[in-house]
Image (cartoon, rainbow, N blue to C red):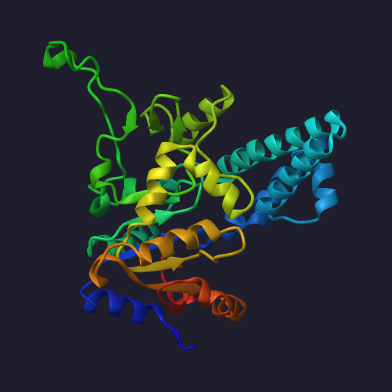
Amino acid sequence: MAIETFEDVVESIRTKGRTFHLLVGNGFSMAYDKKIFSYNALHDFIENSNDELLSKVFEVVKTKNFELILQQLGTFSLLISALGSDEKLKKNIDMASAKLKTSLIDAVKTLHPEHVFKIPEEQIASCSKFLKLFLDVKGSIFTTNYDVLLYWVLMRSAELKSVVDGFGRDRESPDEYVPSSELEYSELRWGKYKSNQVIFYMHGALPLFDTGIDIIKEEYSGQHYLLENIGRRVDKGEYPIFVTAGNGKEKLTHIRHNRYLSYCYDKLSEIDGSLVTFGFNFGEYDEHIIDAINIAAHHGKSAKSKLRSIYIGAYSDDDVRHIESIIDKFKCKVHIFDAKSVPIWNS
């Protein structure tokens, strides 16, 4: 199968006359700094936390793939319940799973660049230019990443400040007369602007919290950086919306139990035109994403109202072979392009 360059993809975006959407995975963040955002870095951070229970888990499973570990722990817990085995053992396994999810959030937060201004201006500009390729043709941006790199680019880029992620402020006590000088507004809540939303955090993200009533987005407050404010919530026992289940079915179950995540998933299932992916490897834990893409490929009655093609970025020969081996899973035309040819972070 012919491997295209990103220039070929850009040419298609400019000449095909259709909408192009973008889906990014962990490779988007790793392209910024592999030392921070790889599974190895997260694994090493958690392993060095000296948690005895997690250390035993890592010693036994011998993998740095958190999705696989969580899947195995979930399977063991279900087996114990089904076989009526030791309840103490089940409690320890469930505790290990909960600790791993918590530690994963803490690791991402701690390893993250301290604040938005740590990202050089030229890298913000380069990433902004990349994102605008899709926004300029009325495409949407989907991400499965938990970190705030995308959020920070949107904050820093003057060209992207008007991009809508669905969050906004509600006026407090809207039915009462209040002098304009005394008006008060809520924290950033999701829903008011969702009809114009073009940024979708498919698996949640560090700044997003479910209060039970509202989905809110934590923000930079003037006195404290964003990660400081997120840290304060975590210290109080509040945790971000974060899909950390193992396989695709478990992830989709988690997604369907949260109205924000479910909305994002449905929006991916409704896209038309073409989809470009970067840093997303369509592994065995991503079947739910493939399902959404295939729903989009059958969505609508005409060719113009459904997803017609997907352009998948591949970093290596192994990546290319993997994509070629799963082409039959996609219900639309598949292109492969060289992900190394994409200058997202100008590095």
Q: Residue furthest right?
A: 86
Give residue 218's position: percent from left, percent from top. Answer: 41, 32
Give residue 144's position: percent from left, percent from top. Answer: 48, 53
The part of the image, by quadrant, that contains residue 324 is bottom right
Does 128 sit left or right of 48 as displayed? left
Q: Which of the two residues, 315 or 83, is positioned nearer the viewer here?
A: 83
Residue 21 to residue 113: above or below: below
Give residue 14's position: percent from left, percent from top. Answer: 23, 75
User: What residue is rendered at 61% in x and 46% in y?
Assistant: 245
Q: Which of the two residues, 12 or 224, is positioned nearer the viewer here?
A: 12
The part of the image, by quadrant, that contains residue 237 is top right
Q: Residue furthest bottom?
A: 2
Does 228 sit left or right of 274 as displayed? right
Confirm whether residue 11 shows in the render: yes
Confirm whether residue 28 shows in the render: no
Does 327 sit left or right of 296 as displayed? right
Q: Which of the two residues, 137 or 259, is positioned nearer the viewer here?
A: 259
Total residue callouts:
0
Q: Which of the two residues, 239 or 115, is positioned nearer the viewer here?
A: 239
Residue 309 to residue 107: above or below: below
The part of the image, by quadrant, that contains residue 22 is bottom left
Give residue 300's position: percent from left, percent from top. Answer: 28, 63
